[in-house]
Amino acid sequence: EDDEEEAYYMKDLPKYACAYCGIHDPACVVYCNTTKKWFCNGRGNTSGSHIVNHLVRAKAKEVTLHKDGPLGEAALECYNCTCKNVFLLGYISAKLDSVVVLLCRQPCASTSSLKDTNWDSSSWQPLIQDRQFLGWIVKVPSDSEQMRARQISALQINKLEELWKEKPDAKLEDLEKPGIDEEPAQVMLRYEDAYQYQNVFGPLVKFEADNDKKTKESQTQDNITVHWDIGLNKKRTATFIFPKANDEIKLMMGDELRLKYLGEMHKPWAGVGHVIKIDSLTNEVTIELKSNANVPNDCTQNFVTDFVWKSTSFDRMQSALKVFAVDEHSVSAYIYHKLLGHEMEEVVMKTSLPKRFSAPGLPELNHSQVYAVKTVLQRPISLIQGPPGTGKTVTSATIVYHLAKQNSHQVLVCAPSNIAVDQLTEKIHKTGLKVVRLAAKSREAIASDVSFLALHNQVRNLSGNGELAKLQLLKDETGELSSNDEKRYRTLKRQAEKELLQHADVICCTCVGAGDPRLSNMNFKYTLIDESTQATEPECMIPVVLGCRQLVLVGDHCQLGPVVMCKKAARAGLSQSLFERLVVLGTRPIRLQVQYRMHPALSAFPSNIFYEGSLQNGVTAAERTRPIADFHWPQPEKPMFFLATSGQEEISSSGTSYLNRAEAACVEKIATKFLKGGIKPDQIGVITPYEGQRAYCVMYMKHSGTMPNKLYEEIEVASVDAFQGREKDFIILSCVRANEHQGIGFLNDPRRLNVALTRAKYGIIIVGNPKVLSKQELWNHLLTDYKEQQVLVEGPLSHLKESMMQFSKPRKLVN
Amino acid sequence: EGEFEMKQKGPKHMTCPEDDDFMAAFDKMLVDNIQQRSHETLKVTQTDIAVPTNYKSQVRKPFVAAKDSMVEQTSEGNSPPLKFALMTKKGNKTQFSTLDLNVSQQFATRYREREMEEKAE
Ligand SMILES: [Zn+2]
Ligand SMILES: [Zn+2]
Ligand SMILES: [Zn+2]
């Protein structure tokens, strides 16, 4: 019967029927210029109208009205500049005539550019309000029309949009067809064998790779203006603005971009280079071209750029999974079974423990760090949990020192991110061990504190290698070598690299870097992976399968986990780290318990909520107290407060829905107060969960702050994720969400809250709407705690007073 | 009778992660677009929007008087419904399209207020 009904509605629908629900009243539909499909202006059961749902998912911005609609054939464009972006369009009305015109939000509708006084520029209103086109532009279908139409859920909309990316002509019915929408197999806790393991993870890595490829390759930027230069190594560099049209794609150092010349001043040219510099403030990037040949460096205009997607990291994960399955020497038998979740008896390894546990060149260890080092050395596999500020890196470096000294065998040290690898490399170097930092070739031009330990620099500094040195000099001077010389140069370089790698005590690289061909013939029995809770399991396996017998995983599963962009893969469990799975399997992590970062008042709440109250303070309140001129904490002993705002997450007219202007204004006032009180800008961090608020805060501070702009520019404003693993003296957290109906988004994740609360050394200020936040259990705890401590305050910064707001009693949290 | 019942209840909003994602994506897209726009260096001449002088005499009146004369049978004290028009350009020509104000009374109200103010002065 249902089928019949469906068939009835879908029978011979006109071309302009809503591609989601089939509604086809000409007054109610709009045409998407990009995808060439029609959609209605009804919400159905979603929170935005169908056309808006579509525009957002397809990242489309221009539409055409139906000629039989309320406005006839009128074009939806700015009256003044003909901008057609519906996200920027709005209308203003004349003061005396009953006329309205469409104007873009910026610059045409701004007061300053509106010359004619007959128009009321303050009356500007966006065309899309509450995620729906205004009814006088596109009629909203009546309730009964919507009820009779095909009912499509947000989930189905998502799937259909995904399908359209591959098959633009697909219909909703196609979703039901087999094979279209297969969910991959879920990760498991235990695996029969490594083949099954590979069969589960292989497809997930593939999904993530496909997703990554799709988003990155869809990024083409045109109208690029290039500034040319020549680098120290005689390589040609190009600098240009790479606008962040879509910040799902984060450009990283070492990424490759293709630059193409489209103008007529030079014959067609395209060249590939990797990113060696990114200025996040101006969006300016610099790439170093791979070849200097035929570069049109006399032209500056008419370039386009796109992303060169590389499968390397995914290929290395797949290869690690395969090696794990087919090569019985890839890991020891014990580790093999342990990783697959098989029941194993505890083993203690026969090792002579060192007399002193602290390593030369590094700080003395505290009791829990000594315990961790001692335990790790005796076990074939161990987990170290390092809550914020507990000296994870020093502990890791100390472990590496002992592993290298005891076994006279090389140690492989990895972490998912280059920053983490560099930090650890630096510490290990201090112990006097011979360290080589292996970096990807594309990152060789990128400077860091440990550049001198990088393999390519060590090769350069190698003495007694006359021929290689000579060729290197020639290459540096001329930029390129003859093909014979180049061949010889490569051979010699490879030999030198091999030599250095084989004689190193420790090799440090990213997890993905462990798949570098230069390590492929080497065998690493001892492996330590730092920040392992931020790596996906297949990523972690890359260093592991190089012969591991003793494995140390360091991390904190109570902080943020690995980033997985493909929702399908994330749903299937790819975002769970190996560390976490081993915890679930019953391996108890050794927890570092003394924190040296936060003022004791700041560590209390995170300790109680996230670490069963086990965090001890290695710093005193006095050591973490810094007076700020003309500024007082509401409770002198506690450098923290929650500033209650009732600022609304903004809708419509002047702003956008997930900025929170009131909060941004508070952030600016606090930052200004800090700066005036003598705090240096680089010691202040502003955390906000949303990119919109981040951008707005940066803009607002510069615009409205009374201190010099340069100071505000030096204040780091970033997402929680960007602050993971780092610290600042003072943190201002802007929560943004203040919407009764929508939950609080990102702040819902306890791990994210943990990270946000544990970045500050000397003081933290949270700005948010307690009423909305308190509906979430964890925030309710936080607010109740702050209230009990009398640091839940409201009012202007100069006259803060305790808030009398009441919350429902929090339920007991179960960890 | 079924239809009668359906008129009673419209479609109900269903909360789900996909819809939350959509709302977040919408917000982001809006901000991204505004951000990008403010970075673009736009060479736009000052906005000068003149309402053609013939609008009042020729176009406005028919809007008020013609067409839905049925609707205009309003009770005494009420002023007749206003007809608003959207002014657009097609090439060099200025065009007017009538707006259906039943769905957006907001600026009509504002317009009336202003008209009152003017009269008061
Ligand atoms: Zn629809
Ligand atoms: Zn404009
Ligand atoms: Zn087994």
Image: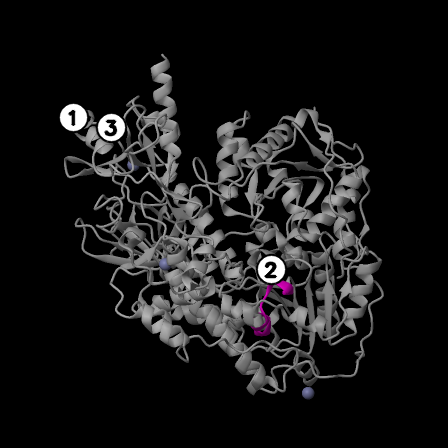
- Residue B107 place in picture, x, y as percent: 37, 32
Image side of residue A307 versus residue A740, left or right: left
Q: Mark 1 — residue?
A: B54
Q: Which mark is residue B49?
A: 3
Q: Which residues are magenta?
A: A532-542
Ligand 2, seen in the image, is in the quarter at: top left
Chain bearing mark 3: B
Task: Name the residue rendered at 32%, 42% in the picture.
Answer: A136
Is A497 part of what is drawn in magenta?
Answer: no
Q: Secondary structure at mark 2?
A: helix
Q: Mark 2 — residue?
A: A421
Q: Are marks 2 and 1 on the same chain?
A: no
Q: Amino acid at mark 1?
A: Asn
Q: CA distance from mark 3 to mark 2?
A: 60 Å
Is A541 part of what is drawn in magenta?
Answer: yes
Q: Quadrant of the C terminus of chain B?
A: top left
Q: CA distance from mark 1 to mark 3?
A: 15 Å
Image side of residue A278 versus residue A269, left or right: right
Q: Which mark is residue A307?
A: none
Residues under numbered marks 1 and 3 in contact, where contact means CB atoms less than 8 Å apart: no
Q: Secondary structure at mark 3?
A: loop
Residue A121 vertical position relative to residue A548 in the rendered view, above or below = above
